[in-house]
Image (cartoon, rainbow, N blue to C red):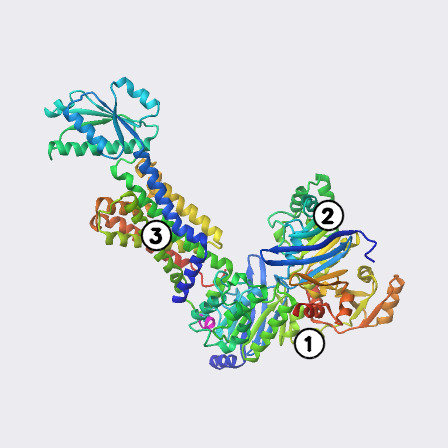
Amino acid sequence: MQANQTKIIIVENLVKKFGSFIANDNLTFDVAKGEIFGFLGANGAGKTTAMKILCGLSHPSSGRVTVAGYDIYSQTEKIKRSIGYMSQKFSLYEDLTVYENFRFYGGIYGLSRSMILDQTQRLLSRLGMSDYKDRVIKTLPLGWKQKLAFSVAIIHKPAIVFLDEPTGGVDPVTRRQFWDLIYENAHEGLTVFITTHYMDEAEYCNRLSIMVDGRIKALDTPSALKERFSCNSMQEVFIRLARN
Amino acid sequence: MKAFIKKEIYHIFRDYRSMLILFGMPVVQVLIFGFAITNEIKDAKVTILDQSGDVLSNRFVSKLTASGYFKADRALDHPSQIEPAFREGRVKQVIVIPSGFGADLGLHKQVTIQILGDASDPNTANMLKNYTMAVLNAFQMQEMGMQALPVDVRVEPIMYYNPELKGVYMFVPGTMAIILMLVSAMMTSISIAREKELGTMEVLLVSPLRPWQIIVGKVIPYVALSFVNALLILSLGWFVFGVPIIGHKGFLMLEVLLFIIMSLSLGIFISTVSPTQQVAMLLSMFALMLPTILLSGFIFPIENMPVFLQWISNLMPSKWFIIIVRDVMLKGSGIAYLWKETLIIFGMTIFFIGLSIANFKLRLE
Amino acid sequence: MECRVRSDYNIRLMIRISDVEKHFGDVTALDKVTLSVQRGELFGLIGPDGAGKTTLLRIIASLMIPDAGSTLVAGHDVVKDFAKIRQMVGYMPGRFSLYQDLSVLENITFFASIFKTTLEENYDLIRDIYVQIEPFKHRQAGKLSGGMKQKLALCCALVHRPELLILDEPTTGVDAVSRIEFWDILNRLKAMGITIIVSTPYMDEASLCERIALIQGGHLLSIDTPAAVAASFPHSLFSVKTDNFFLLLTHLREWSATFSAYSFGEYVHFTPTSETITERDIMSFLVEKGHSETHVTKTQPTIEDSFMYLMMKKQNQYAG
């Protein structure tokens, strides 16, 4: 199924060392356009390191990586233009209004005034928050902020969005609304690269990679993984892989 | 309590930045101030225009050149040479000995020695003038015995500050005030604020430790460190720059200790009102360091400030501390002369301790 | 009378909270919270960020004064008798709050000494945890992995053998494996007679507690055993799966017979508006919408189902 789709992230033999410590040991994987790719691993397994490399924030020690068709060594600026990033810690300015935040981030990516306005209207109406355009961020509930942070991350219409534990600490209803948002955008062709500690969320991904001690221990669809390890849930799969 | 102190010492010694501030700063500051001030004088050229050329004026000139305070030579022959010499920047001061110097002096007549200073650098000019006057005074004593002669020295340039000769040594008390303030107040306020920021304060509050135990435990290592620092500054002053300590050394140490405790209570007060290390740092910087440097009389003499600022300078603990240290070190004064200043610092200590106790919170906001 | 009631608390109840309120400016963090925890109980406070968990735990730890209501810990009032409470409570705040620049051993020794005890004295209590971090005892706390930090923080909170252990989100940001190990440890501590109140945003951890309180927006939604909370879900529940997850959710939400449809792993948990709707009805609706590989089965509600139901109910109450 993936074979005839465009590969938007290609990682071949990626190695990242810090001194004698090997954070990423020979990673090889690819992500297809429009895919929701789950990137799981225990604390300290090397997820963050790999994610930083893919975002163009750090160079690998060796290996070949292309993101959105650009080379990770020589074209990091182009990569940064074609990706969006959102982490658990919000990147929104609490004392600015919703629109001011959109305008700021849109401005960073060089969007024109009218385009920022268009995008803001489109993204807010999708969230059902059009009436809140001029509200100051800090007066909004946590779940809304998280959804807004996601929208801000995709204001420049990136090809890929990286989400680093985006749903930590959010109530179960909002968490699901957040995933609805992810699904909607993936449906329109956005590629989603996501890390999470919630194992039920792992099941929502098209494919999953599970990292243990700097290596990818397993990579497949959630159902194939459960079948292969004869487990009933991703939680069990994860524990089995991470424990030994 | 012992464990608390031990923990605090670990914190200090494991953070190379705080170590650098603690021990690097005083050394660097003393050396910078010390060398900057003494070198300015030592390298300054003083030229003498001796219009008299008699035995007495010769003796005066050789005393000037031998003083070692500055490079003095007899290079001018005519008053018209004075201005070009200044303009070329070759000399910083010209001493003009009038003709008939020896003769008039012998007749107990009034003699006018003219000291011309380059006021474009008033600091140096003033110090050079002071040195020259000191040499002149010594010369007078030596030549005429105890009998004071009406030698009238007129000084041409307008000087801005440091009217006392001993001003050269001011950098030791001044640096000491800054360093003790920095180490004691800034470091304690930051270290208490850090516990708040990290959330460890929460755990300490929930423990049976009393607030005063937390504070005393925090403060004791800094008392010790500040004291070591004070000794370091004094010995640097003594060994490297020859700054004397004329007064009673024990008394000086007690005054230093009092000032340390004052600064610590100020630091604790700052920490009770700042939620984060950054706030503590900024507060210490702007509320303590800048006023200490600018208003304590260390760099800008208080008597030349506008009345309003003079008034404010009275609120600077470091102003009183600098007076105490200067007088003890350089004049040899004791408690009989300095009780007022001591009492002021003591009062400030009580005030800040009280304020900190009133402000210290047993709970989170 | 007063005396008798107090001793009664001492015997059975570790925590007694009645009508506690706390406001921060115009934000209500806790709204008339009433709750009690038995001695020896492992009690879970389950809710998302900003629900009021931390505020409630801080009030119990005597770190915060409630605006209204009373809180007794082992019969002592948290406002007046805070000194007594601080002797008997072990508290682990949400953030990793140990001294990062001190080693593992130095941290433990320090926290032992402020309670005037030693590691050796209460070694039996923390041995199980301590042996896991012992290999790193000379490493600075800041250089430990997430799971190790958690264990060290627990050691430090336990070193004075507290009667009540208050843990604020000990497993947040910790991976699934470390979380399971952490809960094993809590169960062992409970077996040693320590009362534990622990907060968590992870619904799946709720089932590991004896009793739980669901908290959201400063309100307690429900207090009961995990099984009873799950069983309190008042509707029938189906788990549904088809070949297209996204369209499945979209179609179910558009359906007039839908009360709620939430994703649960690879399934959608579907609640109909009427109890008369059966598997067959759902199946035929989905086939009509063009789904294939359709699976519909009746399923048991989980705590998360109950939480979402109660949360929406509360919100609708407020909305009108």
Q: Do tag 2 and tag 3 residues touch (Cβ < 8 Å)? A: no
Quadrant into which the N terminus of chain B falls: bottom left
Amino acid carrying label 1: it is: Ala
Q: Is residue C85 magenta?
A: yes
Q: Residue at x 53, y 61 (%)?
A: C142
Image position of B97 (left or right of B205): left
Disc 1 packing (10 Å; few <14; some 14–19; many ≥20) = some
Of circles 1 and 2, which is in front? 2
Magenta stretch holds residue B55 = no
Q: Are marks 2 and 3 on the same chain?
A: no
Rate crowding at label 3 as few (under 14), some (14 to 19) or many (20 or more) other CA atoms within 10 Å: many
- Discs 2/3, front: 3
Q: Tag 2: Cα neighbours inside 10 Å, few (<14), some, or many (≥20)?
A: some
Q: Residue at x 48, y 59 (%)?
A: B196
Residue at the spot of label 1: C227
What's under tag 2, amino acid-wise? Answer: Pro
Q: Is residue B45 visible?
A: yes
The part of the chain drawn in magenta is C83-87
Report x, y in % for residue B297.
32, 41
Whole-number angstrom distance, CA of label 1 to CA of label 2: 45 Å
Out of B3 and B219, give the one closest to the viewer. B3
Q: Chain of mark 2?
A: A
Q: Is residue A124 visible?
A: no
Residue B298, x across and y down, in percent: 33, 41
Residue beneath label 2, please? Answer: A158
Q: CA distance from mark 2 to mark 3?
A: 57 Å
SS of the residue under disc 2:
loop
What residue is shown with label 3?
B229
Q: Identify the amino acid type marked 3.
A: Asn
3 and 1 marks in contact (CB < 8 Å)? no
Compared across the picture, whether B205 is left or right of A136 comes to left
